[in-house]
Amino acid sequence: MRHLYLNGAWQPSASGESIDVVNPATEELIDRVPAGSPDDVEAAVAAARAALPVWSGTAPAERGKVLAAAASLIRERSDQIARIIATDMGAPYGLAMKVHTLMPAGVLDSYARLAETYDFDTRRIGASRILREPVGVVGAITPWNYPLHQIVCKAGPALAAGCTVVLKPSEVAPLAAFALAGIFDEVGLPAGVFNMVSGRGPVIGEAIAAHPGVDMVSFTGSTRAGRRVAALAAETVKRVALELGGKSASVVLPDADLPAAVRTTVASAFLNSGQTCSAWTRMIVHRDQYDEAVGLAVAAAAEHTVGDPFAEGTRLGPLVSAAQRDRVVRYINRGQEEGARLVAGGTDRPLDRGFYVEPTVFAGVAPGMVIEQEEIFGPVLSIIPYSRGEDEAVAIADGTPYGLAGAVWAGDESRAVALARRLRTGQVAINGGRFNPLAPFGGYKQSGIGRELGEFGLEEYLETKSLQL
């Protein structure tokens, strides 16, 4: 069994217990990781607190050099890391390489550069000098759907800011976290600056969120779990950053390039087998184009081949676990019970083994249906008609508790931008604009608090102090 990474060394858990790691494509046991205990969290926080004065006092440029070295090692070992993620999380190998591995390396590099260029202490307001200082010990609680990227989005800016980190990776797909901890160890990150305690959320996540020695907790996961983290953190009035659920809309105006809008929306909805919080899982189309859009979506869905993550041509791997597959199947059944029309996919098992779900498209979806309101987190797209103009389309798009991402499609870009400005969501793609890992990422409403990536992500981990001179 693997060990925890505490105070610069691999150490066994105080609990002596383990958690099985299962390959979702084969349903076979592939590893075991420690089921950490509150005592392990105590040791990790103590190490992080002891390391904080030296690390926060290290010149930002020197901190950046360590992050750049770690990014370089991720790239050097990209094949190994991508294979780990394809095996314990189920992402197709090409996606595991490009999105799950190389993108985090790029994000880490961006924080290496920001550590060198960000103005931490020379700003002036009148006679006052403004200092930006590390918030302190950061508890990072990360999910399984992008297991390396989500860690880097937290640890990268926290370390660049001069904070120390206690990480709890997901117990469902934890192996990339162990690889990253090994990389941080190799590049010479001082003992205690980065600590990792694997284990279950109700044990390790709650112990981190409640710990008085943790100054900030950054959490990515479900809205329900985020509420619990925020409630525990409130007891010690610590800072909280939450990146939570989404039910993002792709709004297609009548003058848009309909084939491009549908094809790209389907790809977004099915990315990572639909296990993406920012996926555009609702397509809102004018009633005059509705039947055509449904036909295009069915054709596009057929191109998303389900298969083994290492097989040539696979676009959809398995869902991460049996529990996740069962959850998605329940939603597909619920959609049919509510009267939505299943036009692609369904609940049949596409392969004899593995936690697979067919790429699924619902037509005849009405605002307020459960499949239109709740985050399914699987390859399921709902197509919703509107007929009374842009006001109705905006009302449908904004009609869920979430506001994480979205898209607007129009022949006139200025019209698309004007509509995007009306949406209550944190990030909107205009006519298929590409994801920018340097732009702020985060949501409105119950999609969370705070922003990740780029300079905005760095500032989440900084306190502000003014010196009156």
Image (cartoon, helix red, strand yellow):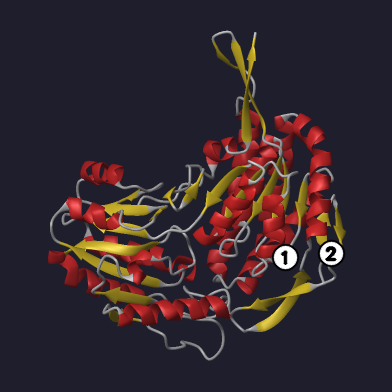
- Give the mark count: 2
| Residue depicted at x 35% and y 71% | 371
Q: Is residue 15 visible?
A: yes
Helix, strand or loop at mark 2:
loop
Q: Is residue 440 left or right of residue 3?
A: left
User: How far separated are the C-alphas under marks 1 and 2?
Assistant: 10 Å
Q: Position of residue 381 (x, y in %)?
A: 35, 70
- Mark 2 lies on residue: 13
Q: Quadrant of the C terminus?
A: top right
Q: Is residue 69 left or right of residue 430?
A: right
Q: Position of residue 63 (x, y in %)?
A: 73, 36
Reading the chain from its start, which is encountered first: label 1 or label 2? 2
Does 309 appear above or below 402?
below
Q: Residues within 10 Å of mark 1 (few under 14, many from 20)?
A: many
Residue type (three-letter) at the residue carrying disc 2: Ser
Q: Is residue 104 visible?
A: no
Q: Position of residue 139 (x, y in %)?
A: 68, 49
Does 112 appear above or below 197?
above
- The answer to which image quadrant residue 147 occupies is bottom right
Q: Is residue 346 left or right of residue 195?
A: left
Q: Quadrant of the N terminus?
A: bottom right
Q: Residues within 10 Å of mark 2 (few under 14, many from 20)?
A: many
- Mark 1 lies on residue: 199
Residue type (three-letter) at the residue carrying disc 1: Gly
Helix, strand or loop at mark 1:
loop
| Residue depicted at x 67% and y 84% | 28
Mark 1 and 2 residues: CB-CB less than 8 Å, in contact?
yes
Residue most extreme to the bottom = 352
Q: Position of residue 463 (x, y in %)?
A: 63, 31
